Image (cartoon, helix red, strand yellow):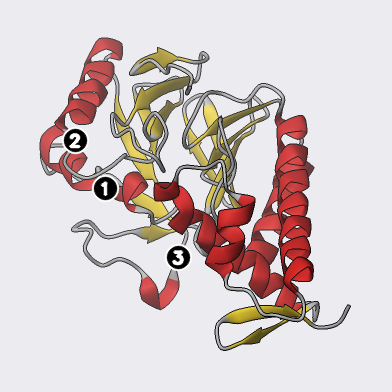
Amino acid sequence: MLSVIPKLEQLSARIIRVLGCNPGPMTLQGTNTYLVGTGKKRFLIDTGSHDVPEYIDCLQTTLDKNNIGIQAIIITHWHHDHVGGIAGIFRKILKNGSVPLLKFPLGESEDTSVDQQYSYLKDQQVLKTEGASLRVVHTPGHTVDHIVLKLEEDNSVFSGDCILGEGTAVFEDLADYMQSLEKIAGLKPDVIYPGHGPVINSPLENIQHYINHRNQREQQIIECIEAKYPAPLQSMDMVKIIYKDVPEHLHPAADKNVNNHLSKLKKEGKINEENGKWVLSKL
């Protein structure tokens, strides 16, 4: 059972959370978007999914209630549940006005369907608004362009999808992801504001749980392959063993994670691939 998250909540003197109203298996209660700062113009971190009128209404209500506007929109990464609301915000809230749209570059695979032009961020760049300084920290792994934002005044971190308030995150590159977890731990935040799920008040403990969880998964994968040696094993066979208590509709996402573990183990020379199946390099 997921925690209940209000659609609108003042989390601190500098932070208002507006829930994306887009719940689902991969988005949990919905995407957390955040208004950050203390002045008349504030940063908006992430924008939820495409075409969710309830979210646009909630965001407009929050802006009106606090008599504030948007200084810039900062995107933690390219996934559609974080960039999807951009068009609606520009059209319905900004009335086609212009504010900076900021994200880390994705490269040649950048989504060009966004009508507004991105301005690209750099690692360690500091963004300032009244009452808030946000340091950009490039944390690839979940996606190539993923960033977290450290709020210097509160020693807190907006973690995007690198760390969630409940459950564990998916990723594209496990080696990068593990390095990014260590990078966030090195920031020693007092609080983490995740892209999905409730606020994390024990960040270092939570990050270590993520690291331990990934190491445990890796060991489970190795044990699956060892148990079938010398016969090769498909990744989905491992998913059905390791994730036997997880609903089947989530198995494709689990399979992606397993395949990322397998790629890492292959690079380390611990396993070999044979026609899409996996076997130990040696006992």
Residue drawn at 77 percent across, 53 percent down? 215
Kindly give the residue lying farthest to the bottom in the view shown. 275
The reply to whether discs 1 and 2 touch (Cβ–Cβ < 8 Å) is yes
Nearer-N-terminus badge (1/2): 2
- The residue carrying mark 1 is 84
The Cα atoms of the two marked residues, 1 and 2, are separated by 9 Å
Nearer-N-terminus badge (3/2): 2
Can you tell which quarter of the image residue 180 is in? bottom right
Residue 244 badge:
none
Q: Position of residue 214 (x, y in %)?
A: 71, 51
Residue drawn at 41 percent across, 14 percent down? 9
Q: In the rendered structure, which amino acid carries the disc numbered 2? A: Val
Nearer-N-terminus badge (1/3): 1
Can you tell which quarter of the image residue 219 is in? bottom right
Judge the density around disc 1: few (<14), some (14-19), many (≥20) Cα neighbours within 10 Å: some
Residue drawn at 57 percent across, 52 percent down? 125
Residue 52 badge:
2
**Residue 191: in sight, yes or no?**
yes
Q: Position of residue 222 (x, y in %)?
A: 77, 65
Q: Which residue is at the front of the view, 225 or 211?
A: 225
Q: Which residue is at the front of the view, 222 or 211?
A: 222
Q: In the rendered structure, which amino acid carries the disc numbered 1? A: Gly
